[in-house]
């Protein structure tokens, strides 16, 4: 008897220990649907959602219903009873005018009007004299978005007693670009191999595909380019089209369309033609036939993404033709099926004196020459997803062409998946930049949402950071970058702060102290990374693997002075920085006059872009009162110190979230600190060889010599 009691005692103790320490692997992302911890809220939610009237049988409605039941079950430990009767104060009504006679009964005209084609409304209403909660939309997909947002209200512990919400997307094409290869490696992927298991498709459907679609739909993403922009022509063969079709089938109930990157030389590589010249009639026919074939497999196929004549990729220029000639040929092939062409303006061939000027020089003269189903995809900055760049001068400069913003969610230049860097502030910095194209207020957000010029199509793309790691993104906080990309794609006018708030609550906890402390940490994290990597407008000074510092790396010979190699930082004994004013490359002239004069004059150029636009003497007096050299040192040290602070703040959160993710982040922050010190010391020591100036007093000496950092090798980090 005693031994039975003892055993029971041990089991109880072990269970309670495992409850405290039970970890979470991060697989569920922000869709955890854990039981609501606040008991008052838990009871409120339980009562208001006891019954649900949720008719409809489309696959999208089924997905929405399943999500709602699953979410409510997890959060309130109760499955709503599906019914067709309203019980006072205890019923949810969910529907569109087509699926629900209640929604069609002229009671919700305002909500429906405000919801548009893809939006939704959520409100507490009185229907036939009875109080209830209504989620309504004009379309099934709008309803799915409404359901996800209703669940978010519960996850973030909002009161649901007096809701009057309506929302709709501001941008039409909200797309994740996967740079995934057919062999499951990922270009610039840092979270394991590709989530697409091409080998097992189409026969084997991994639950991940559905969970991927759920996560995307929950933030409003409605498209996925499945393969790398540096495309393999095989993607367009029937062998791979059936696989892409299987993925499209998984995504369809979640409103996500499939797109493919194409290789411009496909007619030669897989079509047996002698040329891929877009003016060749056989080539044109080949693409038309190919489009028909794709739509046979995937009737709602979204279209093509094209990287042409950039970094060695083939394109129309290979055959003496222009970008529009190439893009329009593909647009003609897709048009009968309502597909679009996303034509990238990221052109880089190492032959121009200033790479920052190349895309504008090539594309600005082409404005108005593209067909109406072509959208030109422009990176946020004129070089290449650097920690900080000024906005791309093409925004606002091609008024007759819809432009799509491309940002990078994967952290190629921002610490891979070992560093906590919340990217919403970076995305917002670009979106909020004023191009002055049509006077004050012509922000990048207004260029890309189509409102500035009244374009019929609008789009935004994010280079995905997903992989087969159990937590999808490698770093638990990298999930926030996927999340914030989606939220900003839906509404580029949201704040970084409100998005971080939602994400933290859904992903970790509603604990007030945790939210306050970690939200601040997230919001500062991008500036911190800029400081320890590339402060004051420095850019492209990473190692060739793109992991860690490499300011000494020589890049090609273009723009070289007296046969010297070209450096992005242009450091010499007098100073540092890339002169892009009229005395240098004059790339600054690509901006509208108000922006140009702000950047061109040393007085008005913001510190953060100083060395992007100016070559400045080491003893130049900065706004802070420091000399440039001292300020540079200060930025590098304060960046690394801020990571130390992040570690302290995180340590204080012990016990507030599950052990598993707490420990994971703790370890990653320790790595981030080492990497920050590595960046700091290597860059300071290297630049010191030009400035010949000592470290100002009170700064600890770098840990190692410059040659130590220059000899460091990091194998396979970019694989
Ligand atoms: C660069 C990446 C390279 C991509 C290229 C692109 O390093 O891997 O192929 O962008 O956007 O940043 O095409």
Image (cartoon, rainbow, N blue to C red):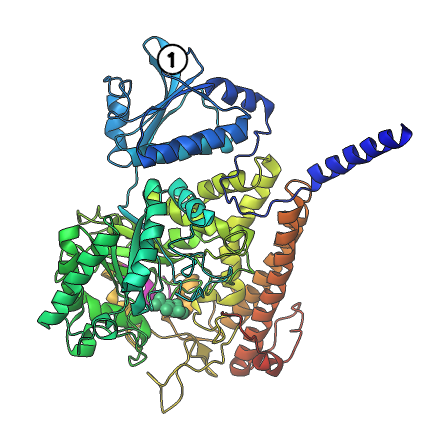
* Residues packed near mark 1 inside 10 Å, few (<14), some (14 to 19) or many (20 plus): some
Q: How many marks?
A: 1
- The picture places residue 137, in percent across and down from the top left corner, at 29, 29
Q: Residue furthest left?
A: 281
Residue under label 1, please give it: 86
Judging depth in this view, the residue of 404 and 187 nearest the camera is 187
Image quarter for residue 152?
top left
**Residue 349 visible in image:** yes
Image quarter for residue 693?
bottom right
| Residue shown at the point (78%, 35%) measured from the top left | 11
Quadrant containing ligand 1: bottom left
Element assignment for label 1: loop
| Residue shown at the point (65%, 57%) measured from the top left | 667
**Residue 365 visible in image:** no
| Residue shown at the point (35%, 34%) measured from the top left | 144
- The picture places residue 690, in percent across and down from the top left corner, at 51, 82
Q: Is residue 667 above or below residue 560?
A: above
Range of the magenta residues? 595-604
């Amino acid at each position: 008897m005693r031994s039975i009691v003892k055993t029971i005692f041990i089991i109880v103790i072990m269970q309670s220990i495992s409850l405290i320490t039970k970890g979470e692997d991060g697989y569920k992302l922000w869709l955890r649907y854990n039981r609501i911890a606040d008991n008052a809220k838990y009871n409120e939610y339980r009562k208001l959602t006891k019954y649900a009237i949720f008719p409809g049988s489309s696959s999208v409605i089924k997905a929405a219903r399943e999500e709602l039941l699953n979410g409510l079950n997890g959060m309130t430990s109760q499955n709503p009873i599906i019914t067709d009767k309203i019980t006072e104060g205890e019923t949810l009504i969910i529907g569109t005018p087509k699926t629900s006679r209640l929604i069609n009964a002229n009671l919700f005209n305002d909500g429906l009007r405000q919801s548009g084609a893809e939006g939704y409304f959520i409100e507490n209403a009185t229907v036939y004299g009875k109080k209830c909660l209504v989620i309504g939309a004009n379309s099934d997909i709008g309803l799915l978005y409404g359901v996800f947002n209703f669940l978010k209200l519960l996850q973030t512990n909002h009161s649901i007693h007096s809701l009057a919400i309506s929302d709709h997307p501001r941008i039409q094409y909200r797309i994740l670009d996967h740079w995934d290869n057919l062999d499951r490696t990922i270009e610039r992927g840092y979270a394991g191999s590709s989530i697409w298991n091409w080998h097992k498709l189409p026969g084997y459907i991994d639950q991940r595909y559905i969970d991927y679609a759920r996560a995307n739909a929950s933030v409003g993403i409605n498209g996925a380019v499945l393969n790398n922009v540096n495309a393999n022509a095989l993607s367009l063969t029937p062998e791979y089209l059936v696989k892409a079709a299987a993925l499209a089938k998984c995504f369809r109930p979640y409103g996500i369309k499939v797109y493919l990157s194409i290789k411009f030389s496909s007619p030669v590589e897989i079509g047996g033609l002698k040329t891929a010249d877009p003016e060749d009639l056989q080539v044109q026919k080949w693409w038309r036939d190919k489009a028909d074939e794709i739509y046979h497999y995937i009737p709602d196929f979204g279209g093509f993404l094209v990287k042409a004549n950039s970094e060695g990729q083939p394109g129309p220029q290979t055959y003496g033709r222009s970008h529009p000639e190439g893009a329009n040929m593909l647009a003609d092939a897709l048009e009968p099926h309502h597909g679009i062409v996303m034509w990238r303006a990221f052109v880089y061939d190492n032959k121009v004196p200033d790479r920052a000027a190349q895309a504008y020089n090539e594309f600005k003269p082409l404005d108005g020459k593209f067909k109406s189903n072509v959208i030109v995809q422009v990176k946020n900055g004129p070089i290449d997803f650097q920690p900080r760049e000024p906005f791309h001068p093409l925004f606002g400069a091609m008024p007759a062409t819809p432009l799509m913003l491309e940002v990078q969610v994967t952290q190629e230049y921002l610490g891979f998946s070992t560093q906590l860097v919340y990217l919403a502030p970076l995305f917002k910095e670009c979106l909020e930049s004023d191009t002055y194209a049509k006077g004050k207020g012509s922000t990048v957000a207004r260029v890309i949402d189509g409102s500035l010029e009244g374009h019929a199509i609008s789009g935004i793309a994010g280079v995905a950071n997903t992989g087969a790691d159990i937590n999808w993104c490698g770093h638990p906080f990298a999930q926030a970058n996927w999340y914030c990309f989606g939220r900003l794609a839906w509404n580029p006018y949201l704040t970084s702060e409100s998005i971080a708030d939602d994400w933290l609550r859904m992903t970790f906890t509603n604990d007030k102290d945790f939210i306050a402390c970690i939200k601040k940490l997230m919001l500062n994290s991008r500036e911190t990374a800029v400081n320890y990597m590339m402060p004051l407008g420095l850019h492209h000074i990473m190692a060739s693997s793109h992991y860690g510092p490499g300011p000494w790396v020589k890049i090609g010979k273009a723009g070289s002075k007296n046969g010297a190699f070209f450096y992005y930082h242009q450091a010499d004994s007098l100073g540092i920085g890339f002169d892009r004013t009229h005395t240098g490359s004059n790339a600054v002239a690509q901006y509208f006059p108000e922006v140009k004069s702000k950047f061109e004059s040393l007085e008005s150029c913001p510190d953060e872009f100083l060395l992007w636009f100016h070559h400045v003497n080491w003893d130049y007096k900065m706004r802070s009162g420091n000399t440039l050299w001292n300020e540079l040192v200060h930025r590098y040290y304060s960046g690394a110190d801020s990571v130390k602070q992040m570690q302290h703040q995180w340590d204080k959160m012990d016990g507030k979230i599950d052990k598993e993710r707490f420990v994971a982040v703790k370890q990653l922050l320790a790595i981030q600190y080492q990497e920050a010190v590595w960046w700091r010391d290597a860059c300071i020591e290297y630049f010191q060889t030009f400035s010949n100036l000592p470290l100002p007093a009170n700064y600890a000496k770098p840990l190692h010599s410059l040659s130590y950092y220059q000899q460091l090798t990091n194998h396979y980090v970019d694989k």
